[in-house]
Amino acid sequence: MTRNEHIVIRNAQAADEQAIATLGVIDGGRHMPTGHVLVAEVGGRIRAAVGSNGAAISDPFWPSAELVSMLRVQTEPELVARSVRFVRRPALAGV
C-alpha cells in the first residue's frame, strides 16, 4: 500500500456478495466472514473483509495485512460485547 491510496472502510452490502465470495476463494476459502461484515476497499476493489464471527479474508496478491488490522479494530468492540456475559448476583440481605 502506498500513502496516496484512498481506503474506504464500510459495511458490506448485498451487492458485495460476489466480490466477497471471490475474495474468499482466492484467500483459500477456509473461513468466510459472516454476520456483520466490514470491507476495506482500495481503488474501488474490495481487498479485505472481516465478519462479526471473527473470520477475515484478504487478497493474497495485494499487501492487505494492514487492511485486515484496520477492519479488526472496527469489529473488535462488537466481538467483545458478544462475549461479555453479565452475572446476576443475589441481593444482600438487609441492604
Image (cartoon, grey):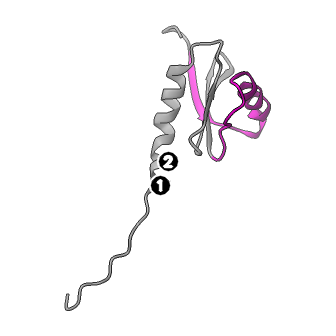
Q: Position of residue 83 (x, y in %)?
A: 47, 55
Q: Position of residue 41 (x, y in %)?
A: 63, 23
Please check the rendered image and state whether residue 7 is part of the magenta-colored stretch, yes or no.
yes
Q: Secondary structure at mark 2?
A: helix
Tell me where the magenta segment starts and ends, as one range: 6-35
Few, some or many C-alpha atoms within 10 Å of disc 2 (few <14, some 14-19, many ≥20)? some
In the image, what residue occupies the spot 59% across and 45% down?
Answer: 53
Which of the two residues, 38 or 55, is positioned nearer the viewer here?
55
Residue 57: x %, y % from top left: 63, 29
Q: Which mark is residue 23?
A: none
What's the mark number on residue 79? 2
In the depicted structure, whether residue 26 falls above or below residue 83: above
Residue placed farthest to the bottom in the image?
Answer: 94
Q: Residues within 10 Å of mark 1 (few under 14, many from 20)?
A: few
Q: Report the residue marked by disc 1.
A: 83
Q: Determine whether 89 is above or below 34 in the image.
A: below
In the picture, measured across the screen, residue 36 lies left or right of residue 94, that is right
**Circle 1/circle 2 CB separation < 8 Å:** yes
Q: Nearer the viewer, residue 6 or 34?
A: 34
